[in-house]
Image: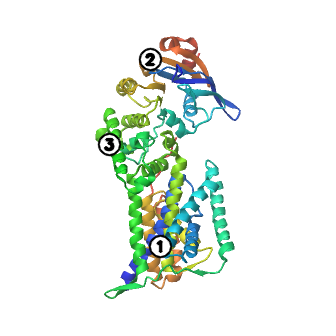
Amino acid sequence: MSDFVLETKNLGISFGGLKAVQDVNLKIKKNEIYGLIGPNGAGKTTVFNMLTGVYQPTTGTFFLNGEELKGNTQEKINHKGIARTFQNIRLFNNMTVVRNVMVGLHSAPEFKCTLLESLLRLPRHFRVEREMRERAKELLEIFGLLDERNHLAYNLPYGKQRRLEIARALATSPKLLLLDEPAAGMNPQETAELMDMIRFVRDHFDMTILLIEHDMSLVSGICDRLTVLNFGVTLAEGDVTTVLNNPDVVKAYLGD
Amino acid sequence: MDFIITLVNGLSLGGVYAMIALGYTMVYGIAKLLNFAHGDVIMVSGYAILVFLSFDPILAIICATLFCMLLGIAMERVAYRPLRGASPLAVLITAIGVSYLLQSLAQIIFGAADRYVIVADLGSITLGEVKIDVGTIITLGASLVIMMALSLFVKFTRTGRAMVAVSEDRDAARLMGININRIITITFAIGSALAALAGLFSLFRVPTIMPTYGAMPGIKAFVAAVIGGIGSIPGAMLGGILLGVVECICNSTPLAPYTIAIEFAILIVILLVKPTGILGKKRREKV
C-alpha cells in the first residue's frame, strides 16, 4: 500500500505541439483536501481529464493507492475509485434526481443483476431495484435533496444541481473525489455551506478530495495543501499560507 | 365501415413502422449514429424465416429473431465500433456500405427474384360487417405489447436507466462507471430484434421478399423516427403510427398514387414547424 491515495509522476500532455500540462507531481494523502489552483487556462481541468481517462497523458503516469491507472478507460478508472464532478454541471438533465444517483450506483458490486434476470423479472431484479432506490435516497437525504427526488435534474436550482453532482459521484463509491470548481457561481453564503459540506463528505465518507477552485476564501478555508499551476507547469506547492504568500503565485494571479 | 377497416390496417402498419423506427431512434439516441443498414435487418429476417420455415413456423420466428440480434451485434462490433469518435460522415458512409453489403449478400445467396414466404395461413375474422385479417390484428396487438414492454424496460431496469444516461451524456455516464460498449451492444441487439419482428409482421401483409425488401420500410421508419423526434422512444412510436395511418388512409382514396409523396410532405411540414420533431427535445448547447 502506498503512502498516498493519489500520486502523479511527471504527468503531462501535449495537444499537437502545444504542451498543455507538464510535469505535474501531486502527492495526496488519505483524508486530505487538496487544492489545485491557478489562473484561467493553466491546465487544471486538463489534469482532471487525464486523471479520469478522458485524455491519455503523453508523459508521466499516475497511481491510486499505489496502483497505476494510466491507460485505462473512463469507466475502468471510475471502477478503480476515482469519481468527479464537472465545471459546467453535467447531470442527466431529463432524468429525475433519484435516477441520477441510481446511475452512479450502476456498477456497485452489491447491485449486480444480470440483464436476463431483469428481463425475466426475477425476484432478484425487484430486490436490487428496491435496494438501489433506498441507497440513492439515503444519499439524497444526506445532501438535503430528498424532497426533490422526483424532480427532473434540469429543474433544480443551481446550488442543488452542484450538490446532486457530488451525491452522484459519491454513489460510485470512490476513494478519491475530484471536484471541478464546486463554488463556481455561488454567493458567499452558499460557498460557506459548501465548505461545511466538503468537510462533511471527507469525514462521513472517509474521503480524499482534490479540488479545483478560484474562490480563495474556499481554498484558504478548507484546503490542507495546494498546488498552483500556471501555463501548464507547477508554480508552487505546499501548505496554504506558504503557497498563497509566495511572490510568484501573487504575480501569476495579479500580474506585475 | 370501410373507414374502420382502413384505420385498423393503418394502426397495424403503423405498429410495424414504429417497431422499425424504435431501432433507428434508440441507436441514434445512444450510439449517436444513423444506422442506415437497419432496414436491411428486416430483409435478413424475411430470408431467415424463409430458411427455417421448413422446420416449423414458431421455430422460424425465434431463429430469425435471434439471428438478427446476432447480426446487429456483429454489425456494431465490426463496422461501427472501430469508428467510435470518428467523424459522423465516416460512420454514415459506413452504414450505407453495410446496407449494400447485406443486400448484395442476400442477392448472391437467394438470387434477385421475389420469393414467397407464407408464414402461416391465418385467415380473417368477421365482426359484424367488418372483415379483418388475423395477421393485421396480431401485428397491432403484438406491436403494442412490445412497445409497452420496451418502455417499461427502459424505465424500470438498471440497464434501461444506463441507456438513458448514455443518451443524455455519454462522457458523464462513462465517468460514472457505465460501460458504454456493453450498453451500445444491447441497444443494437434490441433494435435488431424489433426489426426482425417487424419483418415477420410485414410478411403477414405482403408475403414476398427480395434483397431490397428492407429499403422502403427502412426509409419510412426513419421518416417516422424523425417526425416523432429522433432519439425519443415515444416519438418513434407516435411517428410510426401516424405514418402508418396516413398511408392506409391515402391508399383508400383517389390520392393513392401520391401516398409516398404525401408522407414525405408531412415530414417537411413538421420539420419546418418543429425542427426537432414532435416529441424531440431541444438540446442545450454545451459550452
Q: Amino acid at mark 3?
A: Arg
Q: Amino acid at mark 2?
A: Ser
Q: CA distance from mark 2 to mark 1?
A: 71 Å
Q: Amino acid at mark 1?
A: Ile
Q: Earlier in the sequence, mark 2 or mark 3?
A: 3
Residue A256 location in percent, x, y? 59, 15
- Which numbered disc, 2 or 1, marks the residue closer to the eye? 1
Asked if badge 2 and badge 1 are on a common chain, one would say no
**Residue B58, labelled with which disc?**
1
Asked if badge 2 and badge 3 are on a common chain, one would say yes
The residue indicated by pointer 3 is A149
Colour scheme of the picture: rainbow
Return the residue nearer the eye: B120 or A29.
B120
**Residue A220, labelled with which disc?**
2
Q: Are marks 2 and 3 in contact (CB under 8 Å)?
A: no
> Farthest residue in the bottom direction?
B129
Q: Are marks 2 and 1 in contact (CB under 8 Å)?
A: no
> Farthest residue in the right direction?
A17
Asked which quadrant contains residue B138, the reply is bottom left
Q: Is residue B271 visible?
A: no
Return the residue nearer the eye: B285 or A99.
A99
Is disc 1 placed on a helix, strand or loop? helix
Q: Are marks 1 and 3 in contact (CB under 8 Å)?
A: no
- Which numbered disc, 2 or 3, marks the residue closer to the eye? 3
Q: Residue at x 39, y 57 (%)?
A: A120
The chain holding disc 1 is: B
Is disc 2 placed on a helix, strand or loop? helix
Asked which quadrant contains residue A52, the reply is top right
Q: CA distance from mark 2 to mark 3?
A: 33 Å
Residue A46 location in percent, x, y? 58, 31
